[in-house]
Image: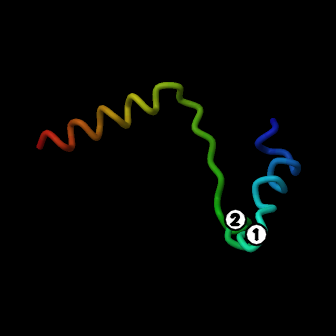
Amino acid sequence: TFLESEHFLQAFSNKGRFVKLLNDMPISVILNPGCALIGAASRGLEKSK
């Protein structure tokens, strides 16, 4: 996939003075289409306590 390609990693980390920081940063891809809704529901329940 594009996100696993060397092209993506180079484009992601090629940011001038932030190169070292971005090269050391882990990258994750969330595949669950409902993750935003799950997060919002979790936050809502947390706030209601």
Question: Would residue 39 be found to the left or right of residue 6 on screen?
Answer: left
Which quadrant of the figure has residue 30?
Answer: top right
Specify how the rendered protein is coloured.
rainbow
Q: Residue 16: image x %, image y %?
A: 78, 69
Badge 1 marks a residue whose secondary structure is: helix
In this rendering, the answer to whether 27 lies above or below 48 is below
Amino acid type, residue under disc 1 in the picture: Val
Q: Are marks 1 and 2 in contact (CB under 8 Å)?
A: yes
Residue positioned most to the top:
33
Q: Quadrant of the N terminus?
A: top right
Q: What separation in Å lies between label 1 and label 2 (alpha carbons)?
A: 5 Å
Question: Residue 32: percent from the left, percent from the top?
Answer: 53, 29
State the mark number for residue 34. none
- Of the 4 image quadrants, the one containing the C terminus is top left
Q: For residue 15, which quarter of the picture?
A: bottom right
* Vertical side of 7 occupied by 24: above or below: below
Q: Which mark is residue 19?
A: 1
Horizontally, residue 43 falls left or right of residue 13, namely: left
Farthest right residue?
7
Task: Say left or right for 49 vs 6.
Answer: left
Specify the amino acid type for callout 2: Leu
14 w.r.t. 47: above or below:
below
Q: Quadrant of residue 47?
A: top left
- Label 2 CA crowd tier, 10 Å (few <14, some 14–19, many 20+): some
Q: Which residue is mark 2?
A: 22
Q: Residue furthest left?
A: 49
SS state under label 2: helix
Where is residue 18? Give x, y as percent. 71, 70
Write the residue at 28% across / 41% down.
43
The residue shown at (62%, 48%) is 28
